[in-house]
Amino acid sequence: MSLRPPWPVSYFLALSIIALAVPLLALLGMEAARLTSSERARLFGETKRTAERISADLDQTLNGYIAVLESLATTPALAEDDFATVYRQAEAALKSRGLYAFLRDMNGQQLFNTRVPYGAPLPISQGFDDRFLQHKRPYVSDVVIGDVAKKAVMAVSVPVMREGKLRYVLSLSLEPVLMKELLDRQKLPPDWRATITDREGTIIARTRLHDRFVGRPLTDVPKAEEAGSVPQGTDVEGRPVNWGTATSGVGEWIVYVSVPTALVDAAAREALLSYVLIVAAFTCVGIAGAVGVARVITKPLNQAESAAKALGEGRTVEFAPTLITEANAIGEALVETAKLREQAEQQILLLMREVNHRSKNMLAVVQAIARQMPSTDPKQFVRQFSDRIVGLAASQDLLIESNWQGVRVSDLVRSQLSLFRELIGTRIEISGPPVRLQPPAAQAIGMALHELATNASKYGALSDAEGRVEVSWRLAGSGEEREFLLDWVENDGPAVTPSERRGFGYTIMVAMVEKSLDAEVKVDYAPTGLSWKVRAPARCTYEGPETAGRAAKRQGAKDAAKEDAAKDKDRGAA
């Protein structure tokens, strides 16, 4: 290997791998100590956040119980001391949820309890909480043995006020199993434990061995300031654990989430071992594989170089797919560029033929108009010839604006009636769905509409102040039977008199349209006004079965030349 640049790819790959591996090896000793500490801190953070999440869920649940009580406390029946009605309301609202309500007076006498039928003898509950009596606000009790339930329960109480004085205490009796269900919804990992205790440390609920430990005190739970940043201790199962805690803001209950210390240590060791193995494997395998990777990279680069030379020399460009995405992108771009260059050359030739073909078509149309015009009066010839050329030009403008991809019927009608635009919407009504006509159809119908508009302004519905013109179109049928229908109907104009001879105007309105669209045209000189109706196959539009709603694709230059020759032959025969 030369010591002077340029250097091969394998050289740079080896240098990059060494540059990454050496610092990692130097930091390995420092990282070993840091990983254990950070993994402990991470797991403690997770236990802390989990405890806070459970506490928030607990607060939400307790607030829901308080809301239920406050709703019952404001019922009219309770205001009227109708305890039987309140009993029925509470039982209907709470029984399905596993909750029980009871009402006490200021002497502690229970007035009803939904655990027993209404009217059953009830005990006097002694020991109102001092803070509840002082502040007269909703209160959540610690674990007690219920006078009626005869087992460990908790109570959520709200005051019932009368004229600013405490009259009754309305309470919900909560069983620990409800809190157990709340913990089960958290979906903790198998080795984790979550515990809820009251203010005195009595266990209310636990994710594991709930029935065994409920109502018993939780011991050996050090506070954070006593155990450092990661509280440690022994749970009721005798396992050394790390604790995360959070206090409920509503009930002042405490949520403990613990993870075994052995699990923390194992996670730290696993992270350290993974780190060592990754660094070692990266160093050894990386350097050994540098040359192989260089070969994989060099091959597509050489192939791309050959493709670029072929493109510059105008030869066929080929590029076989490789394992390198970027190299494939370059190769595909070179191949696509070669195809685009070839297509551009063909497009230029095609466009030249297209311009020549369309120029011949336009000259043929103008020639046909000139030949079939009456020539006895030069002034009349010039005037009529100019009018028809203007109508043809309007259709041509629309075709050019759409890049010869068809003309919307609505645009075509409005352009040919542009001299009467102030009447559109009043005396001229235009209606129909969005339909585009093929270029030959647009030219023929455009000239016919111009002829109809001219005749209507001279002799028909637009020659006086009362006549009306309705122009409508639609597509009917389906599949190969689908048809394009166009109607021009005049009403309320002067009486219509059929012409004794059929001049060039009739040729434009009927013969030219029938030939260009392969259509059937009917002209009716009814007394109420002229009626001109066209029924043509839908293939004259871009919504027909042969076009499927899109412009026909351009063929190659050879196909275009054959098409031009055939059309020139037909035009000569005509």
Image (tube, rainbow, N blue to C red):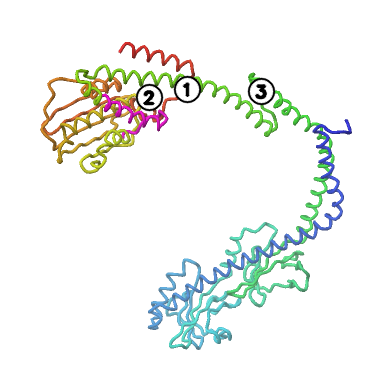
Residue on which the image places disc 2: 546
Q: Which residue is mark 1?
A: 351
Residue position for label 3:
312
Judge whether residue 387 is colored magenta.
yes
Judge from the rendering whether residue 177 lies leftward or rightward of residue 298; answer left or right.
left
Q: Position of residue 367 (x, y in %)?
A: 31, 18
Q: CA distance from mark 2 to mark 3?
A: 42 Å
Magenta residues span 385-409
Q: Is residue 498 left or right of residue 232?
A: left
Q: Quadrant of residue 195?
A: bottom right
Q: At label 3, which amino acid type do we have?
A: Gly
The reply to whether callout 2 and callout 3 are in contact (CB within 8 Å) is: no
Q: Nearer the viewer, residue 275 or 218?
A: 275
Q: What's the magenta bit mostly, secondary-structure-wise?
A: helix
Q: Position of residue 524 (x, y in %)?
A: 16, 27
On-image quarter of the N terminus: top right
**279 left or right, relative to 133:** right
